[in-house]
Image: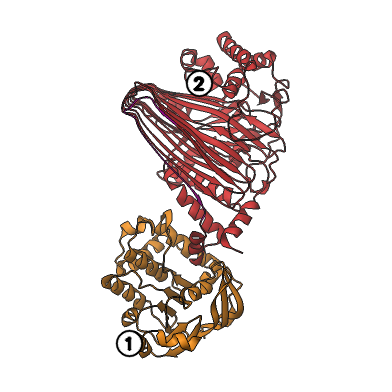
Chain colours: A orange, B red
Amino acid sequence: MLLEVKNLHVEVEDKKILNGLTLSVEKGQVAAIMGPNGSGKSTLAYVLAGKDNYKVTEGDVLLDGKSILAMAPDERAAKGLFLAFQYPVEVPGVATMTFLRTALNAQRKTRGEAELSTPEFMKLVRETSKHLGIDQEMLRRAVNVGFSGGEKKRNEILQMAILQPRLAVLDETDSGLDIDALKIVAEGVNRLRSPKRSMIVITHYQRLLNFIVPDVVHVLAKGRVVKSGGKELALELEAKGYAQYADEAA
Amino acid sequence: MPAVQETVEQVRRIDVDQYKYGFVTDIESEKAPKGLSEDTVRFISAKKSEPQWMLDWRLEAYKRWQTMREPTWARVDYPKIDYQNAYYYSAPKKKALASLDEVDPEILKTYEKLGIPLREQEILAGVVRSEGERRVAVDAVFDSVSVATTFKEELKKAGVIFMPMSEAVREHPELVKKYLGSVVPTSDNFFATLNSAVFSDGSFVYVPPGVRCPMELSTYFRINEANTGQFERTLIIADKGAYVSYLEGCTAPMRDENQLHAAVVELVAHDDAEIKYSTVQNWYPGDADGKGGIFNFVTKRGDCRGARSKISWTQVETGSAITWKYPSCILRGDNSRGEFYSIAISNGRQQVDSGTKMLHLGKNTTSRIISKGIAAGKSNNTYRGLVTAHRKAANARNFTNCDSLLIGDQCGAHTVPYIEAKNASAVFEHEASTSKISEDMLFYCRQRGMSAEEATALVVNGFVKDVLQQLPMEFAVEAQKLISISLEGSVG
């Protein structure tokens, strides 16, 4: 088992968001997490990545059988955890290329690997960005500054492709995308599917799962998993809505 | 620990250990008697074998200084300076050097340690190693005297005069007489007047008409002696159509007592001339409790005397306990242009009050101000700027952008812009912003694998990028490293 979330209770500013969430993700598995607004989907993403102000009051998160809760965000990243942000952050004045390189080399350094040379890195970025329709001009622009919604999401997937994580958490990667942009992003994600890489695809809508077909679907309501099943569960949710689970979780 | 909190902690840990240039060179020196009097002024002038007119000029300034008061309008707070408890002249004992080989090896070693090559062969060797790297002529000022100036001969061939001020007074009196004090008069302000009386050494540059100076010129100032003030004086003249790019760097040993640095820099640009003046100021900032450090009271002013002339100031200020510095442009010539690009970083207990003055006198004059202030620790960082348009300055244009970044919650950033337009056709724009280093930005960087330090350095470098781009390439890299060191808990 790559990831085990055990009976996780989380508070944000004294408000309880996760209430005993339990979830396992196998190596190479693509797990979709669906749920209504306020069910705790994004909170789960942030807690996994180690964001401040998310207080774990009970439970544990294990990666490769070891707890990661005491680790800093950068340590978790070096261990192969990647979060594609729902709202990618702007970093003014820092070229996307510089950002990518700093991030990759920082991870490699933490893992005791040699830094990539400039030609090696350039080659990697050129090849990777091509598939995502990202041109050199975009790589020279400051990270996410003035990017369209689609550019921001493609940039997240580019980072994922460069950093090659073992566990990628995609937080509402479909939000704010038109159908064409969604297809490009989904193709980018599918290209990264591998027996060595697990993914947690968080989404409100079933639409994304037509393009990124999950192995399993978990339904989240009121801070816990209320139902798990195969990919057909997503279609059932699309038809019936989330209302039925509001009662089950209570 | 929250990411921002962690960064703040790391920044707080910066103390004397972080200052790489804090060593002292053990060398015999010759000093003027302690204190300041007419005799001190005469002593300095005699040491430099100055002509009578120079001594008279100094004495007049000294007389004037005695009637003046130390200014108090800046947002800086420091113990009263006892002007009688300092040395005004200190020089390594050996003098009258015929060549670089005669420079005290200890001094050469000092500059080597600072990364400033003084031997031309070594500099040339450096060029062979990395192609495309430009050569830089260096004037090295150690306490009160210039100890070496490189590439003098080669510059001479191009007609460029680059020499210590004390030599220029003797060798080119007509030029010095004509320009010295013509931009910053002896009576200008308390510190400039003090400098006029006791100035020691500095660089003199004259670029003749139509000449583009073939290499970067640079002066490296080093304060070594304890209890000694440094009062350098720099004068740069670009004649019609000439171009010169000049860079100064400064460091000092770590000492418990404060030391005074009161320099004056004057720039004169004639018709169609351009002067680019860059500073990387890294004087000792004092320790975490605010003990020691350099008091940096500097008057820098450029005169765009000719039509279509241009003067550009770029500064990266990371050192000094107190910084009081306003590099300015007098836009006298029609269609002249002034620029000021500044990065001022304060940490620990540092206090920075810095900015610029753009005085539009001529027609169609333009100016641009980009200031980036970064405050961390318990420091205070103030931008103070003045933009004026004279009655006759038709179509004057100014654009000002002041951004401040706060790291932690115990520091302060302040912006004090003064704007006066006496000509109705003037257009002055002012933009200002103050932001705290954002938790979300740091988290985003750290999620990608960067440590708190790396993330902060990246964000800060992004913040100052517009200004870094103005620095000559070689120095931009240096400055970038310096910024990281100034803000991080580790020495790069």
**Quarter of the figure that contains the N terminus of chain B:** bottom right
Main SS, magenta region, reads: strand
Work out whether A100 lies above or below A47: above
Q: Are marks 1 and 2 in contact (CB under 8 Å)?
A: no
Q: Chain of mark 2?
A: B
Q: For residue B62: magenta?
A: no
User: Residue furthest toward the left?
Assistant: A180
**Gap in Å between the C-alphas at discs 1 and 2?**
80 Å
State the SS at label 2.
loop
- How packed mark 1 is, by other alpha carbons closer than 10 Å (few <14, some 14-19, many 20 or more), is few
Identify the mark at residue B184; answer none if there is no mark. Answer: 2
Q: Nearer the viewer, residue B17 or B9?
A: B9
**Residue B395: x %, y % from top left:** 31, 28
Say above or below: B177 vs A146. Answer: above
In the image, is residue B433 part of the stretch drawn in magenta? yes
Chain identity of mark 1: A
Q: Does the image show residue A156?
A: yes
* Residue identifier under label 1: A239
The magenta-colored residue range is B419-437
Q: Quadrant of residue B422?
A: top left
- Along the viewing direction, whichever of A24 and B268 lies nearer the viewer: A24
* Marks 1 and 2 on same chain: no
Residue at 47% of width from left, 78% of height from top? Answer: A39
Q: Position of residue B413 (x, y in %)?
A: 55, 44
Amino acid carrying mark 1 in the image: Ala
